[in-house]
Image: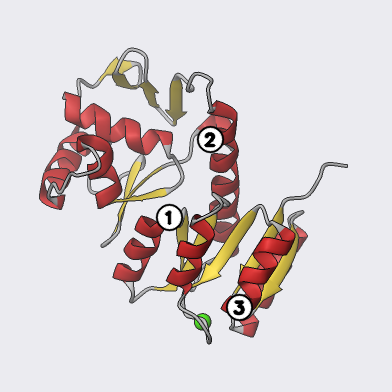
Amino acid sequence: MAIKDKILIIEDENNISTLMSTVLGANGYDVLAVKTGEDALSMISSHCPDLIILDLGLPDMDGMEIIRQVRAWTMTPIVVVSARTYETDKVDALDAGADDYLTKPFGTGELLARVRTALRHNRTIAANRGAGESEMYKVGDLVIDYAKHQVMVNGENVHLTQNEFKIVSILGKAAGRVLTYDTILRELWGPGAHGSNQILRVNMANIRRKIEKNPAKPQYIFTEVGVGYRMAEDENSR
Ligand code: CA
């Protein structure tokens, strides 16, 4: 039997914690659950979970503090759970090193998708260390050919500009995960970059015009309002 991935749930609301434990347990994960930041930190160091699900509003500690402490010594994926009204919290959590977020209330399908993507992404990073990166991304009729610097839809080159191609590549390599505007801008123009989100929006409008059947209802690159963008999950990884 395969070794189960161990998931630590840090959530003080009983019903949400129980729901997540039940769903994840039923889907083959080994689940641990705590309700306070203090218990979380001791559990992380003693049990080394493969993934952490973190509610930002904990009774004894700000969830952001947990992200900072954990990131100081491990890259264990962290999926943040947050209420819809706190978009800046999500951005801060992602920029502090969280891998993704779930907005309350969320469906079980969404929970499982975020968990699967974060676990896989972590493994891909580990596997690719020192090796070549994967050459292709494919979802639906869209293909990113990293070697040729081309994006094809239905087999036809859509002729992206250099910046447009870079943006699509960055999102494709993180497919399934949300990337904040700042993360994308830093990847584009380096760590010191303070480009404006407006430039990104203009580029995204052009990208969508070229790759999406209906740019108003994108099927490849989704907008996460107030946070950033998320590319649809790669078919090969599902
Ligand atoms: Ca809470």
Q: Quickly name the residue at label 1.
A: 97
Q: Nearer the viewer, residue 215 or 133?
A: 133
Mark 3 neighbour class, 10 Å CA radius: few under 14, some 14 to 19, many 20 or more:
some
Question: Percent x, y for residue 199?
Answer: 11, 44
State which quarter of the image contains the N terminus: top right
Q: Gap in Å between the C-alphas at discs 3 and 2? A: 29 Å
Q: Quickly name the residue at label 3.
A: 38
Q: Is residue 217 visible?
A: no
- Image label count: 3
Q: Which mark is residue 143?
A: none
Tell me what residue is drawn at x 30 percent, y 47 percent. 183
- Residue reaching furthest to the bottom: 59
Give the mark nearer the N terminus: 3 vs 1: 3
* 131 relative to 164 in the view: left or right: right
Give, as a three-letter code, the residue at label 3: Glu
Give the mark nearer the N terminus: 2 vs 1: 1
* 162 relative to 95 in the view: left or right: left
State which quarter of the image contains the C terminus: top right
Secondary structure category for the residue under label 2 = helix
Q: Quickly name the residue at label 2.
A: 125
Question: Percent x, y for residue 186?
Answer: 25, 42
Q: Gap in Å between the C-alphas at discs 2 and 1? A: 15 Å
Contact between marks 3 and 1 (CB within 8 A): the answer is no
Give, as a three-letter code, the residue at label 2: Ile
Determine whether 169 is above or below 21 in the image. Answer: above
